[in-house]
Image (cartoon, rainbow, N blue to C red):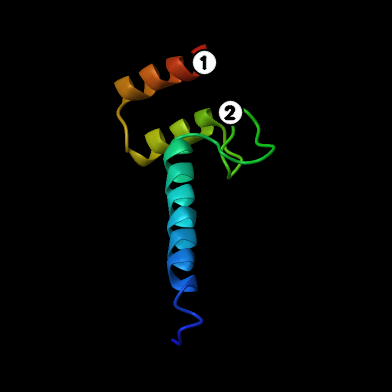
Amino acid sequence: MGQCCAGYLPVLVCIAFALLACFLVSRFLCRGSICSVGGQHGKNLSGESPQDILNARYAKGEIGREEFERMKREIREE
């Protein structure tokens, strides 16, 4: 790079760092929740309800009966 471009490199690095920081913060804040514009309460991005997801996990054997019943009660309380 020539002398004229040397002043822009730190600025570009700062912009890239700021964009990365914004991305990581947004990922952290949206972790485990629905972060979409106009999203519906109780629905995830695929359109499945929490009850649908819970039923699928139980059917696959990922969770046992006791955990399934406990989680089902928690979903109904919300």
- Where is residue 36 shown, x and y percent of the image? 61, 41
Q: Is residue 17 visible?
A: yes
Q: Nearer the viewer, residue 11 or 56?
A: 11
- Where is residue 10 shown, x and y percent of the image? 43, 67
The N terminus lies in which quarter of the figure?
bottom left
Q: How far apart are the two marked residues, 2 and 1, measured between alpha carbons?
A: 11 Å
Circle 1 packing at 10 Å, graded few (<14), some (14-19), many (20+), is few
Q: Quadrant of residue 45?
A: top right
Q: Nearer the viewer, residue 39 or 50?
A: 39
Circle 2 packing at 10 Å, graded few (<14), some (14-19), many (20+), is some
- Where is residue 70 shown, x and y percent of the image? 37, 17
Q: Are marks 2 and 1 in contact (CB under 8 Å)?
A: no
**Number of the front mark, 2 or 1:** 2
Q: Residue at x 46, y 32 (%)?
A: 55
Q: Nearer the viewer, residue 8 or 26?
A: 8
Q: Residue at x 43, y 50 (%)?
A: 21
Q: Does 2 sit left or right of 70 as displayed?
A: right
Of callouts 2 and 1, which one flags the residue occurring earlier in the amino acid sequence? 2
Given the image, on which type of amino acid does mark 1 rest?
Arg
Residue at the bottom extreme of this rendering: 2
Residue at the front extreme of this rendering: 3
Q: Is residue 18 above or below residue 42?
A: below
Q: Is residue 61 above or below residue 14?
A: above
- Where is residue 31 shown, x and y percent of the image? 43, 38
Question: In the drawing, what numbered circle is on residue 76?
Answer: 1
Q: Nearer the viewer, residue 23 or 39?
A: 23
Tag 2 residue: 42
Given the image, on which type of amino acid does mark 2 rest?
Gly
